[in-house]
Image (tube, helix red, strand yellow):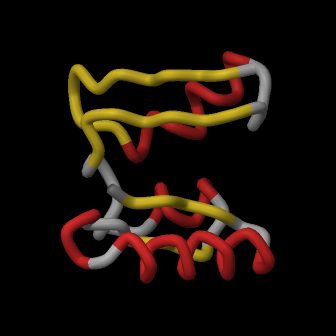
Amino acid sequence: VTLIEARGRKVSFLEEAARVAGPAANLTVLHARIEQAGNDPTHRHAYDLITSRALADMPRLISLARPLATPGATLLAMR
């Protein structure tokens, strides 16, 4: 599971949560904007499931998520 977050305070919290959860949780925290992650070859077309909460309107969210998604990926958008 890769958690992408742009805000430093939230990244710190997520990193601590990942540390407490331990290696078995298989959590990675990426301090980046979604646009940056989508341009990084490591993350491009790498995810079968993408979730977001109140990130953008649906057309914009789809365009932001598309570079990260594998073909046939699922997008769960919580508003």
The x, y position of residue 39, in whole percent, is 47, 62
The x, y position of residue 72, in whole percent, is 23, 20
Residue at the spot x=78%, y=70% of the render? Answer: 7
| Nearest the eye: 23 or 8 | 23
| Nearest the eye: 20 or 29 | 20
**Left or right position of 2 against 61:** left
Residue at the spot x=58%, y=65% of the render? Answer: 36
**On screen, 42 above or below 3?**
below
Residue at the spot x=51%, y=37% of the render? Answer: 65
| Image quarter of residue 49 | top left
**Left or right position of 3 against 34:** left
| Image quarter of residue 55 | top right
Residue at the spot x=47%, y=55% of the render? Answer: 38
The x, y position of residue 78, in whole percent, is 66, 22
| Nearest the eye: 58 or 10 | 10
Tell me how many marks there are.
Answer: 0
The x, y position of residue 62, in whole percent, is 57, 25
